[in-house]
Image (cartoon, rainbow, N blue to C red):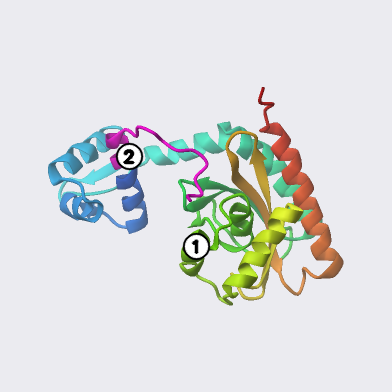
Amino acid sequence: MSMTSTELRKPVVAVQRAVRILRFLGAAQRPAGVNEVARALGIVPSTCLHILKTLDHDGLVSEDKAAKKYQLGPTLLRFARDMVGSNDFVRNVQTALDRIAQAHQVTTVAVWREGTDRIIVVAKAHAPTNFSIHVNIGSRFPALTSAIGHCFAATGDMDPAYLRQPFEELNWQNTPDFTTWLDDVAYARENGYAIDAGHHIGGVTVVAAPVREAIAGTNRAIAGLGLSEQLKGGALASLAADLKQSADTLSELYTEDIV
Protein backbone atom coordinates (compact mmCIF):
# COMPACT_ATOMS: atom_id res chain seq x y z
CA MET A 1 0.00 0.00 0.00
CA SER A 2 1.09 3.56 -0.67
CA MET A 3 1.69 6.21 1.97
CA THR A 4 -0.09 8.83 -0.11
CA SER A 5 -3.09 10.40 1.60
CA THR A 6 -5.06 11.15 -1.55
CA GLU A 7 -5.32 9.33 -4.87
CA LEU A 8 -5.55 11.31 -8.11
CA ARG A 9 -8.03 9.53 -10.36
CA LYS A 10 -7.47 11.44 -13.61
CA PRO A 11 -4.17 13.35 -13.53
CA VAL A 12 -3.55 16.00 -16.17
CA VAL A 13 -0.57 14.55 -17.98
CA ALA A 14 0.78 17.88 -19.25
CA VAL A 15 0.77 19.30 -15.73
CA GLN A 16 2.50 16.22 -14.35
CA ARG A 17 5.17 16.48 -17.02
CA ALA A 18 5.73 20.15 -16.26
CA VAL A 19 6.16 19.40 -12.55
CA ARG A 20 8.58 16.57 -13.32
CA ILE A 21 10.63 18.90 -15.51
CA LEU A 22 10.81 21.51 -12.76
CA ARG A 23 11.89 18.87 -10.24
CA PHE A 24 14.53 17.52 -12.62
CA LEU A 25 16.01 20.98 -13.24
CA GLY A 26 16.02 21.68 -9.52
CA ALA A 27 17.79 18.42 -8.73
CA ALA A 28 20.30 18.84 -11.57
CA GLN A 29 21.72 22.04 -10.02
CA ARG A 30 22.82 23.15 -13.51
CA PRO A 31 21.27 24.10 -16.86
CA ALA A 32 20.15 21.18 -19.03
CA GLY A 33 19.23 20.86 -22.68
CA VAL A 34 15.95 19.61 -24.12
CA ASN A 35 17.27 16.21 -25.14
CA GLU A 36 18.83 15.56 -21.73
CA VAL A 37 15.59 16.43 -19.95
CA ALA A 38 13.50 14.41 -22.39
CA ARG A 39 15.71 11.31 -22.06
CA ALA A 40 15.82 11.49 -18.27
CA LEU A 41 12.04 11.78 -17.94
CA GLY A 42 10.93 9.63 -20.88
CA ILE A 43 9.18 12.51 -22.65
CA VAL A 44 9.11 12.96 -26.43
CA PRO A 45 11.66 15.74 -27.19
CA SER A 46 9.19 17.88 -29.15
CA THR A 47 6.67 17.68 -26.28
CA CYS A 48 9.42 18.46 -23.78
CA LEU A 49 10.45 21.51 -25.80
CA HIS A 50 6.88 22.85 -25.93
CA ILE A 51 6.55 22.49 -22.14
CA LEU A 52 9.91 24.16 -21.52
CA LYS A 53 9.01 27.05 -23.83
CA THR A 54 5.73 27.54 -21.96
CA LEU A 55 7.45 27.43 -18.57
CA ASP A 56 10.04 29.90 -19.88
CA HIS A 57 7.30 32.25 -21.06
CA ASP A 58 5.86 32.35 -17.54
CA GLY A 59 9.23 32.67 -15.80
CA LEU A 60 9.22 29.24 -14.18
CA VAL A 61 12.31 28.29 -16.13
CA SER A 62 14.93 30.44 -17.80
CA GLU A 63 16.50 29.64 -21.18
CA ASP A 64 20.12 30.31 -22.01
CA LYS A 65 19.50 30.93 -25.70
CA ALA A 66 23.17 30.72 -26.67
CA ALA A 67 23.68 27.34 -25.02
CA LYS A 68 20.08 26.20 -25.64
CA LYS A 69 19.78 25.03 -22.06
CA TYR A 70 17.22 25.59 -19.32
CA GLN A 71 17.32 26.18 -15.57
CA LEU A 72 14.80 27.14 -12.91
CA GLY A 73 13.46 30.65 -13.33
CA PRO A 74 12.97 33.64 -11.01
CA THR A 75 9.20 33.33 -10.77
CA LEU A 76 9.68 30.31 -8.50
CA LEU A 77 11.33 32.60 -5.93
CA ARG A 78 8.24 34.80 -5.91
CA PHE A 79 6.03 31.74 -5.50
CA ALA A 80 8.16 30.58 -2.57
CA ARG A 81 7.96 34.00 -0.91
CA ASP A 82 4.21 34.16 -1.44
CA MET A 83 3.79 30.67 0.00
CA VAL A 84 5.68 31.57 3.17
CA GLY A 85 3.64 34.74 3.58
CA SER A 86 0.19 33.40 2.72
CA ASN A 87 0.10 29.74 3.77
CA ASP A 88 -1.79 29.39 7.05
CA PHE A 89 0.19 26.39 8.27
CA VAL A 90 3.54 28.13 7.75
CA ARG A 91 2.28 31.26 9.52
CA ASN A 92 0.79 29.35 12.44
CA VAL A 93 3.69 26.95 12.94
CA GLN A 94 6.40 29.63 13.02
CA THR A 95 5.30 30.92 16.42
CA ALA A 96 5.49 27.42 17.87
CA LEU A 97 8.90 26.76 16.32
CA ASP A 98 10.34 30.01 17.66
CA ARG A 99 9.07 29.32 21.17
CA ILE A 100 10.26 25.70 21.30
CA ALA A 101 13.68 26.58 19.88
CA GLN A 102 14.23 29.19 22.59
CA ALA A 103 12.76 27.17 25.44
CA HIS A 104 14.74 23.99 24.72
CA GLN A 105 17.82 25.43 22.96
CA VAL A 106 17.32 23.31 19.84
CA THR A 107 16.80 23.82 16.13
CA THR A 108 13.16 23.36 15.16
CA VAL A 109 11.63 22.63 11.76
CA ALA A 110 8.24 22.09 10.19
CA VAL A 111 7.95 19.70 7.26
CA TRP A 112 5.30 18.96 4.68
CA ARG A 113 5.04 15.78 2.66
CA GLU A 114 5.72 16.46 -1.02
CA GLY A 115 4.07 13.80 -3.15
CA THR A 116 4.22 10.28 -1.75
CA ASP A 117 7.85 9.76 -0.82
CA ARG A 118 9.48 13.10 0.05
CA ILE A 119 9.21 15.75 2.73
CA ILE A 120 10.21 19.39 2.40
CA VAL A 121 11.20 21.83 5.15
CA VAL A 122 8.75 24.76 5.07
CA ALA A 123 9.70 26.62 8.28
CA LYS A 124 12.53 26.64 10.82
CA ALA A 125 13.87 28.36 13.93
CA HIS A 126 17.29 28.31 15.58
CA ALA A 127 18.18 28.45 19.24
CA PRO A 128 19.81 31.73 20.37
CA THR A 129 23.13 30.00 21.09
CA ASN A 130 26.61 30.08 19.60
CA PHE A 131 26.09 26.60 18.16
CA SER A 132 23.01 25.23 16.42
CA ILE A 133 22.18 22.61 13.80
CA HIS A 134 21.55 24.32 10.48
CA VAL A 135 18.64 23.32 8.24
CA ASN A 136 17.59 25.15 5.08
CA ILE A 137 14.00 25.94 4.16
CA GLY A 138 13.28 24.02 0.99
CA SER A 139 15.51 21.07 1.92
CA ARG A 140 14.01 17.76 0.75
CA PHE A 141 14.39 14.36 2.39
CA PRO A 142 12.88 10.88 2.00
CA ALA A 143 9.53 10.75 3.79
CA LEU A 144 10.69 8.07 6.25
CA THR A 145 13.79 9.97 7.38
CA SER A 146 14.64 9.94 11.10
CA ALA A 147 12.00 10.61 13.78
CA ILE A 148 9.87 12.50 11.27
CA GLY A 149 9.75 9.32 9.20
CA HIS A 150 8.60 7.35 12.25
CA CYS A 151 5.61 9.70 12.50
CA PHE A 152 4.66 9.29 8.85
CA ALA A 153 5.15 5.51 8.88
CA ALA A 154 3.03 5.28 12.04
CA THR A 155 0.03 6.73 10.22
CA GLY A 156 0.52 4.63 7.10
CA ASP A 157 0.66 0.92 6.33
CA MET A 158 2.56 -1.00 9.02
CA ASP A 159 3.03 -4.03 6.75
CA PRO A 160 6.80 -4.75 6.83
CA ALA A 161 6.61 -5.95 3.23
CA TYR A 162 5.75 -2.38 2.23
CA LEU A 163 8.01 -0.53 4.66
CA ARG A 164 11.20 -2.54 4.26
CA GLN A 165 12.18 -1.26 0.80
CA PRO A 166 11.87 2.48 1.57
CA PHE A 167 13.61 1.83 4.90
CA GLU A 168 16.57 0.18 3.18
CA GLU A 169 16.88 3.11 0.76
CA LEU A 170 17.43 5.60 3.61
CA ASN A 171 20.87 7.00 4.35
CA TRP A 172 21.83 6.54 8.00
CA GLN A 173 25.04 7.33 9.83
CA ASN A 174 24.18 4.61 12.35
CA THR A 175 21.69 2.30 10.69
CA PRO A 176 19.22 0.60 13.06
CA ASP A 177 18.08 -2.90 12.24
CA PHE A 178 14.66 -3.12 10.63
CA THR A 179 12.99 -4.68 13.68
CA THR A 180 14.24 -1.88 15.93
CA TRP A 181 13.01 0.68 13.43
CA LEU A 182 9.55 -0.92 13.36
CA ASP A 183 9.51 -0.74 17.16
CA ASP A 184 10.26 2.99 16.90
CA VAL A 185 7.38 3.39 14.44
CA ALA A 186 5.04 1.54 16.82
CA TYR A 187 6.22 3.80 19.67
CA ALA A 188 5.36 6.88 17.57
CA ARG A 189 1.89 5.50 16.86
CA GLU A 190 1.22 4.79 20.53
CA ASN A 191 2.68 7.97 22.04
CA GLY A 192 2.07 10.65 19.42
CA TYR A 193 5.75 11.55 19.04
CA ALA A 194 8.97 9.87 17.89
CA ILE A 195 12.64 9.94 18.87
CA ASP A 196 15.72 9.19 16.78
CA ALA A 197 18.78 9.23 19.05
CA GLY A 198 21.75 9.46 16.70
CA HIS A 199 20.72 7.01 13.99
CA HIS A 200 20.10 9.44 11.14
CA ILE A 201 22.90 11.84 12.13
CA GLY A 202 25.51 10.64 14.58
CA GLY A 203 25.48 12.60 17.83
CA VAL A 204 22.19 14.35 16.98
CA THR A 205 18.83 13.50 18.54
CA VAL A 206 15.68 14.31 16.59
CA VAL A 207 12.26 14.44 18.25
CA ALA A 208 9.17 14.81 16.06
CA ALA A 209 5.39 14.95 16.36
CA PRO A 210 2.77 14.70 13.59
CA VAL A 211 0.31 17.45 12.72
CA ARG A 212 -2.89 15.65 11.81
CA GLU A 213 -5.80 16.53 9.53
CA ALA A 214 -9.28 15.05 9.76
CA ILE A 215 -9.53 14.14 6.09
CA ALA A 216 -5.98 13.96 4.73
CA GLY A 217 -4.46 12.24 7.75
CA THR A 218 -0.84 13.23 8.39
CA ASN A 219 1.07 15.21 5.81
CA ARG A 220 2.91 17.57 8.16
CA ALA A 221 5.09 17.34 11.24
CA ILE A 222 7.24 19.45 13.54
CA ALA A 223 10.59 18.44 14.99
CA GLY A 224 13.38 19.54 17.30
CA LEU A 225 17.04 18.74 16.64
CA GLY A 226 19.81 18.95 19.22
CA LEU A 227 23.04 17.33 20.34
CA SER A 228 22.43 13.93 21.90
CA GLU A 229 24.58 14.92 24.87
CA GLN A 230 22.23 17.85 25.42
CA LEU A 231 18.97 15.94 24.98
CA LYS A 232 18.91 13.37 27.76
CA GLY A 233 16.55 12.41 30.57
CA GLY A 234 14.32 15.28 31.63
CA ALA A 235 15.46 17.56 28.79
CA LEU A 236 14.45 14.97 26.20
CA ALA A 237 11.13 14.23 27.88
CA SER A 238 10.33 17.94 28.17
CA LEU A 239 11.06 18.58 24.48
CA ALA A 240 8.98 15.58 23.41
CA ALA A 241 6.02 16.71 25.54
CA ASP A 242 6.25 20.27 24.19
CA LEU A 243 6.41 19.14 20.57
CA LYS A 244 3.46 16.79 21.02
CA GLN A 245 1.32 19.42 22.72
CA SER A 246 2.20 22.00 20.07
CA ALA A 247 1.48 19.54 17.25
CA ASP A 248 -1.86 18.64 18.84
CA THR A 249 -2.74 22.34 19.09
CA LEU A 250 -1.84 22.86 15.43
CA SER A 251 -3.83 19.75 14.48
CA GLU A 252 -6.96 21.28 16.01
CA LEU A 253 -6.70 24.13 13.50
CA TYR A 254 -6.90 21.69 10.56
CA THR A 255 -9.41 19.20 11.95
CA GLU A 256 -12.93 19.40 10.62
CA ASP A 257 -15.95 17.58 11.95
CA ILE A 258 -17.14 15.06 9.38
CA VAL A 259 -20.89 14.55 9.43
The span picked out in magenta is: 1-18
| Quarter of the figure with residue 241 | bottom right
Residue 197 lies, in percent from the top left, at 69, 70
Which residue does the image show at 27% across and 35% down from the upper left? 14
The quadrant the C terminus occupies is top right
Image position of 133 (left or right of 237): left
Q: Closer to the camera, 150 or 77?
A: 150
> Could you say where residue 15 lies in the image, as x and y percent from the top left?
31, 35
Q: Nearer the viewer, residue 180 or 24?
A: 180
Residue 24 on image: x %, y %: 32, 52
Residue 8: in magenta span: yes
Residue 150 picture quarter: bottom right
Q: Residue at x 29, y 46 (%)?
A: 21
Inter-mark Cα distance, 2 to 1: 29 Å
- Can the viewer see residue 132? no
Residue that badge 2 annotates? 16
Name which quarter of the figure residue 234 lies in. bottom right
The residue depicted at 80 percent of the width and 51 percent of the height is 242
Tag 2: amino acid? Gln
User: Circle 1 is placed at which residue position?
Assistant: 161
Amino acid type shown at disc 1: Ala
The label shown at residue 129 is: none
Judging from the image, what secondary structure is the residue with disc 1 in? Answer: helix
Most common SS among magenta residues = loop
Does the magenta-highlighted stretch encompass residue 199? Answer: no
For the residue pair 170 and 102, the one nearer the viewer reads as 170
* Closer to us: 259 or 138: 259
